[in-house]
Amino acid sequence: MAMTKITADAEQLRQDAITVATTYLHAGLKAIDETFEEDGYARKHPELMNGFLHAAAVNYKASLLVQAIQELTQKMEDAMEKVADTLDDMRLPLSEIARAMEEQQND
């Protein structure tokens, strides 16, 4: 699982942020109105919208952090597996060197 590398410039990131915020705003308006079963309830209670937008942003950040941690964990596991394989590959040559040194000392 590889994270997508961010290649957008600052202007594109700004536009993307606006798009995401607008999406969250519309979703929040709809969700709050449906929850309280009243059209316009969210507009009458901006504190609920504030909470909704904050929760959405925190959730998004947390998801990105978890994704990054998972990717780093996988890379570390892959690296440790390579180290273990390398050590396994070195075991026989090292034991042969040790045996040869013992034989040389016994002569």
Image (tube, helix red, strand yellow):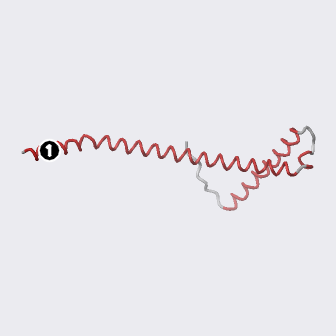
Residue type, label 1: Glu
Where is residue 64? Give x, y as percent.
63, 48
In the shown orientation, is residue 6 left or right of residue 107? right
Where is residue 68? Give x, y as percent.
58, 48
Q: Circle 1: is it few (<14), some (14-19), or many (20+) Cα within 10 Å?
A: few
Which element type, helix, strand or loop, lies under badge 1? helix
Foreground residue among 106 and 36: 106
Where is residue 56? Give x, y as percent.
74, 47
In the shown orientation, is residue 91 left or right of residue 47? left
* Residue labelled with disc 1: 102
Foreground residue among 89 and 45: 45
Rendered-image quadrant of the N terminus:
top right
At x 11% / y 47%, what residue is drawn? Answer: 105
Rendered-image quadrant of the C terminus:
top left
Q: Quadrant of residue 12?
A: bottom right
In the shown orientation, is residue 52 left or right of residue 95? right
At x 76% / y 52%, what residue is drawn? Answer: 19
Where is residue 71? Give x, y as percent.
54, 46
> Which residue is outermost to the left?
107
At x 92% / y 49%, what residue is drawn? Answer: 44
Q: How many marks?
A: 1
At x 78% / y 48%, what residue is drawn? Answer: 24
